[in-house]
Image: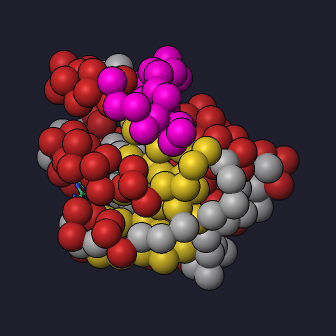
């Protein structure tokens, strides 16, 4: 997968990496910042998604589509949700520039209003506002097939906020879960 990233996708990845780095330094307000995953998390997610059972990828929190490009390397259909219109517009530009617009369905709106229409999910990436994680998890887990995976970002850098939810998931007998210390910490849950 990593050897087959097109030049167009690689260029867009670098563009967004630069924009994200500038956002973090120039005082851009938090909601406007891209807040992307680091590349090592992207590679980890692509490997996990490619190893999931057959079925589609559901991403919650698109931003400008950086993580979506990594997920696209798993060569499956992706449904991705973004609540902010400006970010959704950037994501559309990304999908076109990277040549993955046919592979991706972008739904503009609050994922919590749409997740009950998902069927055939094999892999889900959760990267929205942290106060939405629990609701998104409760909506998506019943829709992920056995052996499928949900990966949630920021398990380490947002641990104070996410710990109560992660503690509940660790007790949830529908999944096996653990925190993987890569990037900002990825909470990986495999559906039993
Ligand atoms: C951390 S950023 C996502 C970064 C992206 N996954 C990446 O690595 O390139 C979180 C994004 O989720 C969006 N978001 C937050 N809550 C959401 C919700 N309930 N439904 C859909 N999108 C949401 C935000 O507008 C923001 O663009």
Which of the pair 149/63 is nearer the observer?
149
Residue 125 pos. (x, y %): 45, 49
Residue displayed at 76% across by 61% down: 6
Residue at image x 28%, y 49%?
Answer: 138
Q: Quadrant of residue 42?
A: top right
Tell whether 146 sits left or right of 188: right
User: In the current view of this chain or complex, which residue is farthest to the front?
Assistant: 173
Q: Nearer the viewer, residue 34 or 141?
A: 141
Reply above or below: 73 against 183: below
Rendering coords of residue 83 (x, y %) = 23, 66
Q: Nearer the viewer, residue 108 or 187?
A: 187
Above or below, 14 relative to 38: below
- Residue at point 78%, 45% (across, down): 2
Question: Left or right: where does residue 175 sit relative to residue 114?
Answer: right
Split into quadrants, the picture shows ligand 1 in the one at bottom left
- Residue at far right of view: 3
Residue 144 in view of the camera: yes
Q: Is residue 26 left or right of residue 140?
A: left
Q: How many marks?
A: 0
Where does the magenta region start and end? Answer: 171-192
25 or 106: nearer the viewer: 106
Q: How is the image coloured?
A: secondary structure
Residue 189: x, y in percent? 47, 35
Q: Position of residue 50 (x, y in %)?
A: 71, 50
**Vertical arrangement, residue 182 with respect to residue 39, above or below:** above
Q: Quadrant of residue 74?
A: bottom right
Residue 182 inside the magenta-drawn segment: yes
Name the residue at 25% across, 43% down: 133
**Residue 186 appears anywhere in the view:** no
The question of residue 119 being in magenta is answered with no
Relative to 60, say whether 108 is above or below: below
């Amino acid at each position: 997968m990593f050897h087959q990233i097109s030049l167009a996708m690689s260029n867009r990845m670098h563009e967004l990496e630069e924009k994200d780095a500038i956002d973090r330094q120039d005082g851009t307000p938090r909601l406007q910042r891209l807040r992307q995953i680091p590349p090592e998390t992207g590679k980890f997610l692509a490997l996990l998604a490619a190893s999931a059972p057959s079925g589609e990828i559901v991403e919650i929190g698109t931003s400008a589509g950086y993580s979506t490009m990594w997920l696209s390397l798993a060569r499956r259909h992706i449904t991705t949700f973004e609540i902010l219109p400006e970010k959704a517009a950037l994501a559309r530009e990304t999908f076109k520039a990277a040549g993955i617009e046919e592979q991706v369905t972008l739904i503009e709106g609050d994922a919590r209003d749409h997740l009950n229409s998902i069927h055939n999910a094999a892999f889900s990436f959760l990267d929205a506002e942290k106060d939405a994680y629990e609701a998104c998890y409760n909506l998506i887990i019943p829709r992920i097939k056995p052996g499928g995976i949900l990966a949630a970002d920021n398990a380490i850098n947002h641990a104070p906020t996410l710990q109560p939810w992660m503690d509940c998931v660790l007790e949830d007998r529908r999944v096996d879960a653990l925190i993987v210390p890569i990037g900002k910490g990825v909470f990986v849950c495999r559906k039993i």
